[in-house]
Structure formats: C-alpha cells, structure tokens
Amino acid sequence: MRVFPRLRGMTQPRTIEDLRSEIDQINRDLLKLLSQRAAVVAQIGHAKTQEGRPNHYDPAREEQQLRELEALNPGPFTGATVKSLFKEIFKASLALEESNDKKQLLVSRKVKKEDTVLDIDGVRIGGDAPPIIIAGPCSIESEEQMEQTAEYLAGKGVKILRGGAYKPRTSPYGFQGMGVDGLILGSRVARANKMLFVTEVMDTRDVEVVAEYADMLQVGARNMHNFALLREVGRARRPVLLKRGLSATIEEWLYAAEYILSEGNNEVILCERGIRTFEKWTRNTLDLSAVALAKQETHLPVIVDVTHAAGRRDLLIPLAKAALAVGADGIHIEVHPSPATALSDNEQQLDFAGYDRFDEALKPMMKVPAGV
Ligand SMILES: C=C(O[C@@H]1C=C(C(=O)O)C=C[C@H]1O)C(=O)O
C-alpha cells in the first residue's frame, strides 16, 4: 500500500466501517440504558397506580430533569436538542406507564382473552353466535304501531325489539316519548311475539323501572358521558347496550363501558353509531375502524347502528354488510310501519318493504358466526 509521506509516523484515520461499528456499540449501550430506564419508569407507574393517582403525567418532574440535563450538557448538541431528545423519552415513558395501566381494564382482552357471549333467554350475542338484529321503531308511539312492527319483525326472525319510551330529543318541545306507558307496551308486545325488548334509559331515577320492563338497557349516544347513569346501569342486573357518544373517541367509549363493568355488570354490548365529522351527506360517519378495534381490544360484543350512522335509507344495506365484514356481532336498525308519519327520525327508518329488501340482502352474511 502506498503511504503518504505526511501520514508517516501519525496514527491512521479510522475508517467509516470502524466508526460505524463503534456507533453500533454505542447504540447497544444506549438501548440497554433506555430499557433499564423504562423498567424503572414502569415501577414508578405501578407505585402511582397503587397510590390511586389516575394522572401519571408529572410536568414538574419532567421540567426539573430537563433543567438538570441542560446544565450538564457537554455538547456538541445544543441545549434545545438535548431537551427535545429527552422529551421524546419522557413521552414514550408516559405512554408505557399508561399502557401498563390499561392492561388492568376489565373491558380489555388482556384481562379476559375469550369473547364475552351474552345469553339472554336463549338469545346468544357475541363470540361464535351468528350476528343478531335489533330492530324496531325509533319511538314507541301507539299499540297499533308496536303490534304491527313486532309481529312483522318476529316473522322475519328478529329476536330483539327496540323502541324508545324516553326520547333524548334535541328540542325540549319535540315528542319526548310515552314514558312508563311505553315501557309497558313495548315489553308486552315483545313478549307476545317471543322477542326480547331493549329500550333507552336516560335518567338514573328511571333505571329501576326500565329494568323492570326491559330485557336490555340502552345507554344512548348523548348519555355516554353520563357517568352517574353508567354506574347505575352497572348496578342493574340487565345487559346494557352502550352507544358510542357523538364525538367520543374509542378510548372514551371503552372507558364508559369500563364504568359499567367496574360496578359488577359484565354484560355490555358496544354499539358504534357513527361519529360527527365535517361530512354533510351522511348524518354521521360510520367508523368501521372503531368496530374492528373494539373487537380486537375488548372481549365485548360489538354491534353497529346503521340507521344513525347513515341517517339515510339508501346506505343501510352496504353499511350493514361492511359492519359484518369487519367483525360486528350484529346490526341495529330502525323499522316503522309508516316512517313518513313517525313522530321522530322519519328520514331514516325503514318501512316493512324496505326491511324485506334489507333482510334479503343481508341473509347470506347472517348465518356464519360473527367475527373475522
Ligand atoms: C416516571 C415518571 O412518570 C412520567 C415520566 C417521566 C420520565 O420519563 O422521567 C417523568 C414524569 C412523568 O411525566 C415520574 O413521575 O417520575
């Protein structure tokens, strides 16, 4: 090899390969230190949970560390760079603490691996059960309306009748529902047709009376954040259909379910019903990823309310097919003998001929067990 005269007697510069292998070693050391740090963070997180501290984020502690690190910084990185690198480490550490915490959630598959399968008087929901249909009018309006609907739906093999007796209307002057008379009517008609009856409860004071008449309690989208109501239905010995809030994140929805389970009621069905977005051509935007995620992250049955997700009749069939394709355990759909004269939601309820078409279109997907 040719030796340059000016290098004679000097140490040879190290090759890029040599330097890179030194970097590789430093990376291994850093990784070891980061993992050691993470193990200590996990212990701090555990201690915080034991102390009952719900918020693991501690900005003062982070600030103190950043100040010390900036003062100790030997360079060549600037103080700002060192701070932003460490902030990333803090962020990842906090996420680790919180994800460890989540493992303890009762709704989580990490706590219960196998699917929760509800069996309500022989009607199975979730797990390997075939998809179920929950159908009926938006509001319970009259004997004739309920009898016609229940008889028709029972003839179609629908096992769960819905109908609102207490209606959460946007305007206080809108039809507010028939109240207890509606409960009595709904439960009588359902029983006469060998169906289960599900209806919404809006007020903690009504949980007892609704549970007396209904086989399943619905917590509506507008009440998903009503923590007192969630606790109360958690104490009721009835399965709960929990709708996702209008603008609730998946995490908020699952925490709402956790409120119910934490009171001892494990029979919760999650119901995705579309979320508020900028889109105007549909009433809400059906969040199919929420369905797939809820199935993956929780052991609870998940169903999809296509009526509210779409807010228009012409999308019900494709949305229901899509819901089942991503693993939904059932479909919730509003059916009314005469939607045009319904006291609420007349744009989106199906009449019987419409339901005939829906039933026909969905039939091939209804026999196989839910889940993908
Ligand atoms: C580990 C802790 O929890 C969080 C993570 C921190 C970290 O990674 O150093 C610091 C403060 C908290 O936001 C702690 O409180 O010490």
Image (tube, helix red, strand yellow):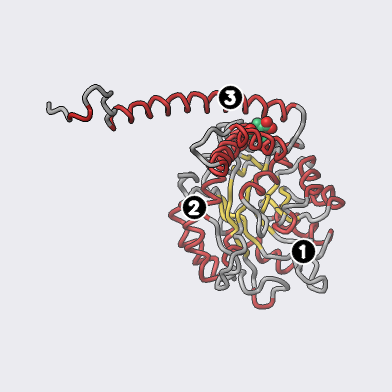
Tell me the kind of residue under disc 2. Answer: Leu
Q: Tag on residue 86? A: none
Front disc: 2 or 3? 3
Name the residue rendered at 68%, 56% in the picture.
245
Classify 258 as above or below 32. Answer: below
Q: Tag on residue 39? A: 3
Work out which quarter of the rendered image holds the C terminus and state it. Answer: top left
- Which secondary structure, mark 3? helix
For the residue carrying disc 2, how many other residues have a C-alpha within 10 Å: few (<14), some (14-19), or many (20+)? many
Count of labels in the image = 3
Q: Are marks 1 and 3 in contact (CB under 8 Å)?
A: no
> Residue 160, percent across and down?
64, 53
Quarter of the picture for ligand 1? top right
Name the residue rendered at 65%, 58% in the picture.
247
Q: Is residue 172 visible?
A: yes
For this view, does 50 lie left or right of residue 38?
right
The residue carrying mark 1 is: 167
Among the two numbered marks 1 and 3 on one chain, the one whose residue lies closer to the N terminus: 3
